[in-house]
Image (spheres, coloured by chain):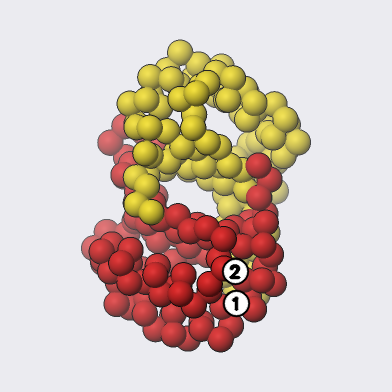
Chain colours: A red, B yellow
């Protein structure tokens, strides 16, 4: 199993509409990827490692897939539509990471 | 529920012993935190957003707790022991993030 993480940095003055993200963007992702998307979690940063420090990431989204190929095949026909939706909730350019699940 | 994420950057020349981490450090964490630690996942970075890009993080560890207070109370008596174990598997100083689970 692999995880695709989409990490939105907590940059000052940035825009992120969590209501739209949760109620429209994630459901769009789920509708287009179907059962290939095994699990999706959304987390909102509330703090960093030291007392009073801000969270490195404003939002983190983690998605579970069987393999990178399964993800790529599922996203290919819908990538343009999904990307076009991003400007509706944020101006942050996310970091993307593919990971192998160790534990 | 809150998530504590420990993010080890994928810096060139850094050291990370995944075997030690998985087989000794994570079990130490589980033993000391007990049932307060609801869930722990470990992921190893395999790629970034563009073809051929390296993963932003070499390792990501996500831990689930009832609340920040529950985490703080559980870690307080064992923080020194857990921190002292870190040099045995890495020289990377991790980013820490506390997040609220949205979805």
Residue at numbered disc 1: A74
- Of the 4 image quadrants, the one containing the N terminus of chain A is bottom right
- Residue A99 place in picture, x, y as percent: 63, 56
- Residue A5 place in picture, x, y as percent: 52, 59
Question: Left or right: where does residue B23 sit relative to residue B35?
Answer: right
Q: Chain of mark 2?
A: A
Question: Left or right: where does residue A59 sit relative to residue A14?
Answer: right
- Residue B17 place in picture, x, y as percent: 73, 37
Q: Residue at x 37, y 47 (%)?
A: B101
Q: Quadrant of residue A46?
A: top left
Let me know if residue A55 appears in the view.
Answer: no
Give the structural element (helix, strand or loop) at label 1. helix
Q: Are marks 1 and 2 in contact (CB under 8 Å)?
A: yes
Q: CA distance from mark 1 to mark 2?
A: 7 Å
Q: Is residue B24 above or below residue A87?
A: above
Q: Residue at x 63, y 30 (%)?
A: B26
Of all residues shown, which one is farthest toward the top? B77
- Of the 4 image quadrants, the one containing the C terminus of chain A is top right
Give the structural element (helix, strand or loop) at label 2. helix
The mark that comes first in sequence, 1 or 2, is 2
Q: Is residue B65 above or below residue B83?
A: below
Is disc 1 surrounded by few (<14), some (14 to 19) or many (20+) residues within 10 Å? some
Q: Is residue A53 above or below residue B53?
A: above
Q: Is residue B71 above or below residue A93?
A: above
**Near-viewer residue (B37 or B15):** B37
Q: Chain of mark 1?
A: A
Residue at numbered disc 2: A36
Of all residues shown, which one is farthest toward the right? B19
- Residue A40 place in picture, x, y as percent: 48, 58
Q: Residue at x 34, y 52 (%)?
A: B102
The label shown at residue B13 is none
């Amino acid at each position: 199993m692999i995880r695709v993480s989409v990490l939105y940095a907590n940059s000052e003055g940035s825009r992120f509409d969590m209501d739209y993200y949760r109620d429209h963007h994630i459901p769009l992702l789920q509708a287009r990827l179907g059962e290939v998307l095994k699990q999706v979690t959304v987390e909102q940063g509330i703090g960093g490692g030291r007392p009073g420090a801000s969270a490195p990431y404003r939002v983190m989204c983690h998605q579970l897939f069987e393999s990178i190929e399964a993800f790529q095949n599922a996203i290919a026909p819908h990538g343009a539509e999904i990307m076009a939706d991003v400007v509706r909730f944020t101006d942050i350019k996310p970091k993307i990471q593919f990971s192998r699940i160790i534990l």
